[in-house]
Image (spheres, helix red, strand yellow):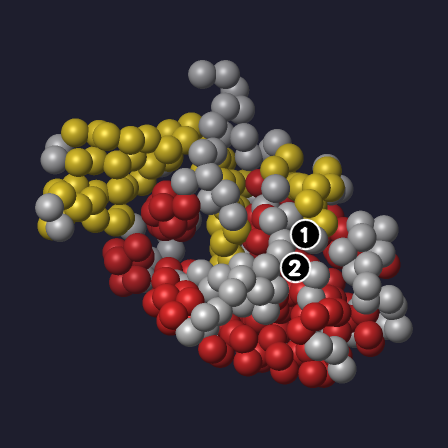
Amino acid sequence: MHAGDAVLVAEVVRSGLVESRHRGSVAALAADGSVAFAAGRADAPMYPRSSNKPAQAAAMLRLGLPLDGELLALAAASHSGEPIHLEGVRRILQLAGLEESALRNTPGYPIDPDTMVDYVRKGGEPSSLTADCSGKHAAMLLTCVVNDWPTEDYLDPAHPLQTAIRDTVGSLAGAPVAHTGVDGCGAPLFAVPLTGLARMFRSLALAPSGTPERRVAEAIQAHPEYTSGTTRDEAQLIRGVPGLFAKAGAEAVIAAALDDGRAVAVKIDDGGYRARMVVLVAALRRLGVEAPVLDELASAPVLGGGVPVGELRSALR
């Protein structure tokens, strides 16, 4: 293994035999901001995907976005497409004086399984409203309206909204944006090191009360079901660890920070979504975080014949 390579962070054990392995990278910060531990490619540029959304929401607040509470949490969401989410997105669009057709994010189905089945049974088709990024896009549109900016091209990387978001992501991460790509929803995607992602979350957690950054952290803490969904493990984690907020992203990225400044960012190399939470929990425990919910999220059962015969567990050393 060369320095900076991804390391073994999780493994699947079936009937006493390791069946699969996940490699990845971890960056963890102590309360004082120093690197408590790091593994893998913690300093290499990576795409945080939707883990960037809290910083994007903070950037929009700096630009005058008039949201708070659950609607601010929804502006930072990868939501499940449940009724509370769709109603919230409609409320944001109403504030902007815009119709659902103004949304430019990639259409999709609700990602909550039960909600999706019900939606399809009723004849629902993929739409920008039901797609998981619609809260962020509605907030982007509202930010444009507040600033009298055009809404038709709000996803253009050169649009003033996106240049402001890029600057905010870099400043909160403590590292310049290394690369600009295109996210799954069509919005510009800004790459920073994994350590920078952890610093971004720490910056939000430690920001003074009333600032845009702190308002985002508090909104996610108070309304985690709006940032994810009522059945999601992200919401379970946030509800179960006082003073913590977290946000996951596609391709198995997740980051979290506590009000005292401790922060963790995780990236699973193969994009295996199932591994990211168990690794995050292991990293939080190494930072000294303890709560009953961590016992529930520290592993996941592996089934055989419908009964547990093993587990997905962290292999972080």
Q: Is residue 33 visible?
A: no
Q: Secondary structure at mark 2?
A: loop
Q: Position of residue 153 (x, y in %)?
A: 82, 59
Q: Quadrant of residue 133?
A: bottom right
The answer to whether 34 is drawn above or below residue 99 in the figure is above
Say which label, 1 or 2, has the lower sequence index. Answer: 2
- Residue at 73 percent across and 63 percent down: it is 59
Count residues near mark 2 (Cα–Cα under 10 Å), then give few for <14, some for 14-19, many for 20+: many
Alpha-carbon span between mark 1 and mark 2: 6 Å
Under mark 2, the amino acid is: Asn
Q: Which disc, if any, is residue 105?
A: 2
Q: Are marks 1 and 2 in contact (CB under 8 Å)?
A: yes
Residue under pointer 1 = 186
Task: Locate the N terminus and report the quarter of the image it occupies.
Answer: top left
Q: Secondary structure at mark 1?
A: loop
Q: Quadrant of residue 273?
A: top left
- Residue at 54 percent across and 30 percent down: it is 41
Task: Locate the C terminus and report the quarter of the image it occupies.
Answer: top left
- In the image, 183 versus 165, the foreground residue is 183
